Amino acid sequence: MIRQRTLKSVTRAVGVGVHSGQRVELTLRPAAPDTGIVFRRTDLPQPVDIPVTPESVTDTRMATTISPVDNPGGPKVQTIEHLLSACAGLGLDNLYIDITAEEVPILDGSAASFVFLLQSAGIEMQNAPKRFLRVKKAVELREGDGPSLKWARLEPHHGYRLSFEIDFNHPALDATGQQMTFDFATGQYRRDIARARTFGFTKDVEMMRARGLGLGGSMDNVIVVDDYRVLNAEGLRYDDEFVKHKILDAIGDMHVLGKPLLASYTAYKGGHALNNRLLRHLLADRQAWEVVTFEDERQAPAGWAELAPAW
């Protein structure tokens, strides 16, 4: 049987939110089977639990933000996508995340620090079948046309594969890889994706800060790009780090489902908003998906049976 996974022990991290600039503490704790991933705002007079679901996503500007489904204007947790990406990369199903502010810390701007934290706590198999959401027919969303066209698609696939193409029409980004495919069956998430950092443009800084965003950003946690080049002294971690970070984000955005996908995801110039709309579009069509388990590990897609997956 392919089993659910949680942590073996508690682990903690401290950092700042990339947008809020606030100091924040995270405590990551094991959770029982079928709990899913649940954020708990422990800084409030009465702690509030916010289970991660597609319906709990209330804002997708610059990051993915969640709030209680029954109180969308209430307490929130923002910038959850890098931590969720790490959870997906390690196959984690159940986790409590206590947080002392409204934004997940940015740490180094990638998912690598979260992978390290989670692996340090250890991964534990649970006595319950892992539930996969299998896409049965293609669903697609398109926005705009001409230069403003963007789209995202989910198609049936026995495994989990993501392809992304960027097009920023910018000399620094155009000089790197514009398209990338990552397959969970053959790739290694830690090696190939987890270290890709978020990026931003100097021309957008004043606009973002006027909106109260980017207050915790620096060259320690963001790839900073001016009109011509990357400004970070150490350069890029991957030749195609920009598009790899878009894959990292998409993995996190898709993991708000609470179940690993069995699907092929393809996107062109997509982002958090389109990803969440695509998931809601999928779930709205009950004929387009099903929840499956694998009693016989041999019938599962490659890679899912291992305790510490190669990805």
Image: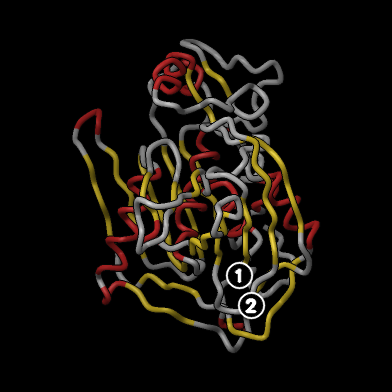
Q: Nearer the viewer, residue 253 or 22?
A: 22
Q: Is 15 left, or right, of 40 in this rendering?
A: right
Amino acid carrying label 1: it is: Asn
User: If the image is split into quadrants, where does the C terminus sit?
Assistant: bottom right
User: If the image is split into quadrants, where does the N terminus sit?
Assistant: bottom right
Q: Nearer the viewer, residue 247 or 21?
A: 21
Amino acid carrying label 2: it is: Ala
* Residue at 62% over, 41% down: 105
Q: Earlier in the sequence, mark 2 or mark 1?
A: 2
Q: Which mark is residue 58?
A: none
Q: Is 123 left, or right, of 168 in this rendering?
A: right
Residue wearing tag 2: 32
* Residue at 75% over, 50% down: 116
Within 10 Å of disc 2 (Cα), the crowding (few <14, some 14-19, many 20+) is: some
Q: Image height check: is 39 above or below 220?
A: below
Q: CA distance from mark 2 to mark 1?
A: 7 Å
Q: Position of residue 136 (x, y in %)?
A: 34, 73
Secondary structure found at label 2: loop
Q: Are marks 2 and 1 in contact (CB under 8 Å)?
A: yes
The colour mode here is secondary structure
Q: Image height check: is 181 above or below 128?
A: above
Secondary structure found at label 1: loop
Residue wearing tag 1: 94
* Residue at 27% over, 55% down: 140
Q: Position of residue 301 (x, y in %)?
A: 56, 73
Looking at the rendered structure, the number of numbered marks drawn on it comes to 2
Q: Image height check: is 245 above or below 7?
A: above
